[in-house]
Image (tube, rainbow, N blue to C red):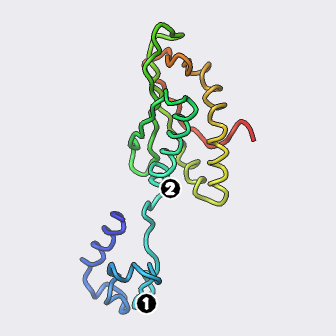
Amino acid sequence: MAYWGRIVAWVRRMPSASLPACCGIFPTASDLSGPSRGHNIACPHFTSVAPVHPIPAQRFTAELLPRIIERLHRLSHGTLHGEVLPPEFPGEPGRLRVWAPARANAGRYANPLDITLSWDSWEVDRLFATGGETRFAEYLDALAGKLDAWQEPRQFDINTHTQADPTVLIGGLDFEHLMR
């Protein structure tokens, strides 16, 4: 809503001569609530309310990254921790840091687990198109297999919570899945 609020404030500062004649009354809070939410009868130029998250990247960060964290937590029986990291650039999806302290006396690699996952923006956009929810659900179901497949090439070990490098970045991810 902050985004919508900035647009409203900007338009309200415009001289009334630059607005179409029907825009003498700009949508107010009461215009945007109730059964006709988002429709201002007085002005056909402003017929819908901007979404709470105006771009898919923000929706992904707010709605879907927590679901990925929850799934990782469940898959690891609570031993993996997840943290949403802010996007590196405006309009990009957030990233996910997955970490865990190394298990005592058992480590394949020298460093404790500290992996950052980032997704391709275009792939994130596709999640909010037709079929995106099904695609995301299938991705969550395949996440255990994906983690397993990433271990050897990226040199980390989920079981011992260790990795070869101090940090590992797995970037440009998509939402394809290994199994159906």
**Residue that carries the numbered disc 1 in the rendered image:** 41
Is 30 located above or below residue 70 in the figure? below
How many numbered marks, from 0 up?
A: 2
Q: Is residue 178 above or below residue 133?
A: above
Of mark 2 and mark 1, the one earlier in the sequence is 1
Q: Is residue 175 left or right of residue 48?
A: right
Toward the viewer: 126 or 131? 131
Q: Amino acid at mark 1?
A: Ile
Task: Pick out the residue farthest to the front.
Answer: 77
In this rendering, position of residue 74 left or right of residue 19: right
Residue contact at pointers 2 and 1, CB within 8 angstroms: no
Residue 40 in the image, given as x and y percentages of width and height = 41, 85
Left/right placement of residue 131 relative to residue 157 reads right
Q: Amino acid at mark 2?
A: Pro
Residue 114: quarter of image: top left
Q: Residue furthest top?
A: 105
Look at 36% across and 65% down and name the residue there. 1
Q: Is 145 situated above or below 53?
A: above
Read off the residue under disc 2: 56
**Horizontal and vertical percent position of residue 67:** 52, 45
Q: Residue 111: x percent and y percent?
A: 44, 14
Q: Position of residue 167 (x, y in %)?
A: 44, 23
**Above or below for 97 versus 56:** above
Q: Secondary structure at mark 2?
A: helix
Q: In the displayed image of the protein, which residue is found farthest to the right?
A: 180
Q: Could you say which quadrant of the image residue 2 lies in? A: bottom left
Residue at 43%, 52% (x, y): give it: 91
> Quadrant location of the C terminus?
top right
Q: Which residue sits at x=46%, y=47%?
A: 93
Disc 2 from disc 1: Cα separation: 29 Å
- Graded by Cα atoms within 10 Å as few (under 14), some (14 to 19) or many (20 or more), the crowding at tag 2 reads many
